Amino acid sequence: MILAEAQRYLAEVDELPVRSPGQAEALKSLTGSLPERGVGAAAALGTLLERSRDAVSATTGPRCFHFVMGGTTPASVAADWLASVYDQLGYTWVASPLSVQLERLALDWLKQLFELPDELFGIMVTGATMSNYVSLAAARQWWGERQDVDVSEQGMNGLPRVPVFSSGHVHASAVKVLSMLGLGRSAVTKLSVDARGNLDLPALRRELRALEGRPAILIANAGEVNCGEFDPIEEMADLAEEHDAWLHVDGAFGLFARVSPRTRHLAAGAERADSITVDGHKWLNIPYDCGFAFVRRPELLARAFTYEAAYLPEPDAERLTIGAFGPESSRRARGMTTWATLLAHGREGYRELVEGHLDLAQYLAELVDSHPKLERLAEVQLNIVCFRYNPGDLADGRLDELNEELGAAILEDGRVLAGTTLFEGKVALRPAISNWRTRREDLDAFVDVVSELGDGLRER
C-alpha cells in the first residue's frame, strides 16, 4: 500500500501542481479528537493515504522555487526509508557502529566534494540553523576562553559583549542563533556599503582595529537569499588572521559554488574558515532534515556540548561518541542518506547537477529579460533569479503592492511555488533552482504563471 503510493507519487510528481486544488478541503479532513479505540495499522495508513494525497505539497517536484529547496535523489529516498526501518541511534558507536561509520565517511566525502581541509571536524544536524548553532557555539566557547572563562561552565554573566560583525547579507538563522546562544540578536554589527547589503570591507577593518587585539567573531555569507551574493571571504579570512577573529562561513547552499570550476571563485577562502555551515536538503537533494557543521577545533565543541552521566561513553572523537559534539543526543542515522546519494552520484554527478542549475538559472534570466512585463533586478551569480512583474506604467508604490499581491496569488494558485522578498527596497520574486528534477519546461511554465497572474491582477 505505502510502496504503491510512493511509486505513484514519484511517477507523477514532475507534472503535479505544487499545491493541489483540493488541498484546503483535504486539510479539513485531518481534524478530530483522539479515538477511544484504535483502528489498526492498515486502516490508519489507508486513511492517511486517502486524506493526504491532496493535502501534500509537491515541494519535491520540479516547480518548487521557494526557500532554496532541493528535491530528493532516488538513492537518498531509499536510504532514508532504510534509516527509518533500521531506526538507529546515531549518538555513539556503542549504540550504532553503522550509523557512526557512515556519518563519519559521508562527512569526509563532503569535505572532498567542497575541497575543504581534512582537519575540519564535521557533524550532522537538522539543517543550516542548527549548523550555525553548532558553529557559533564553538565560536562563543573560543571567545570565552580568550577571556580565560569557560562559558559552557560559568556562563556569560559579567563578560563584555561579544563583538560580531557581518555584512547586510547575514541570514536570519544566524541572527536567531545569536539569540539562542545568549549573545543577543543585536550583537551583530552589519557593515554594508550599499542597499543590497554588500560588505563594507574598510569599515570592518576599522572596527577590528578599534578592538585593539580583543577577539571577535566574523560571519561571512556564501550565497545570500535574494540573488546569491557572496561576501569577500578571502579578504575576511585575511582580517580574521590579522586581528584574532573567528571566521564563520554560512554556506547553506552557496558552498556548493565550490563544486564547479565556473563558480568556485565565489566561495574562495572558505577553506580557511574556523567553522562552516552547509545544508543537505538544499542542493545536495536529500530528504528533510539534514545539515552539516564543519569546525576546525572539535575540542571546543566537546567543551561547549559537554554531556556527562555515569552510563554515557566519554565525549571522545576517537571513541566516536559524535553526539557529544553537538546539541542532539537523540540523533537519526542521517549519514545513511548522505552517504548513499554521494556514492550514487559522486563528485562528477554533483558537479553536473550544480552546473545544470547554473545553466537553468541563466535560461530563466533570459526568459525574464525577453518578457515585456518582467524586470530582472540583479545579475545571476548562482541559482537565484531576482525579478518583478512590471507592466511599465505604475508608480513604485503601486508596483510594490502589485508584486505583493502577485506573490500571494502564486501561493494560492499552487501550480508553481515562489515567494516574495524585499530587494533594494523593491518587492520582488526570488525563485531558486536547486531541484534535480527541474527542466527548462518547468521554467517556461513558471514564467507563464507569473505573467498570467500578474496580468489578471493588473487588469482588476
Image (spheres, rainbow, N blue to C red):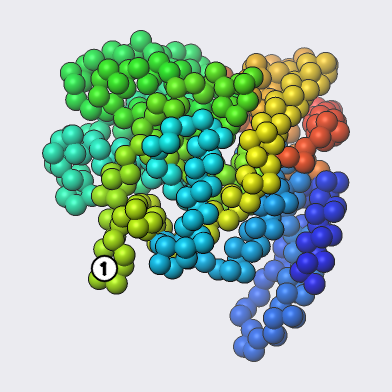
Mark 1 burial class by Cα count in 10 Å: few <14, some 14-19, many 20+? few
Nearest the eye: 72 or 418 = 72
The residue at the point 31 percent across, 30 percent down is: 246
Q: Is residue 365 visible?
A: yes
The residue at the point 68 percent across, 33 percent down is: 348
The residue wearing badge 1 is 309
Nearest the eye: 2 or 342 = 342
Nearest the eye: 455 or 104 = 104
Total numbered badges shown on the rendered structure: 1
Q: Quadrant of the N terminus?
A: bottom right
> What is the secondary structure assignment of the residue under circle 1?
loop
Q: Quadrant of the C terminus?
A: top right
Give the image location of residue 118, x and y in percent.
Answer: 43, 36
> Which residue is farthest top?
202
Query: Is 338 positioned to the left or the right of 162 in the image?
Result: right
Amino acid found under the numbered disc labelled 1 = Ala
The residue at the point 28 percent across, 39 percent down is: 140
Query: Is 245 positioned to the left or the right of 54 in the image?
Result: left
Q: Tell me which corner region of the image, top left, top right, bottom left or bottom right, holds residue 376.
A: top right
Nearest the eye: 207 or 126 = 126
Give the image location of residue 297, x and y in percent.
Answer: 32, 39
Is 227 placed above or below 130 here?
above
Q: Tell me which corner region of the image, top left, top right, bottom left or bottom right, holds residue 30.
A: bottom right
Is 43 placed above or below 216 here?
below
Give the image location of residue 398, x and y in percent.
Answer: 69, 23
Query: Is 189 positioned to the left or the right of 104 in the image?
Result: left
Q: Is residue 170 visible?
A: no
Is 238 placed above or below 52 here?
above
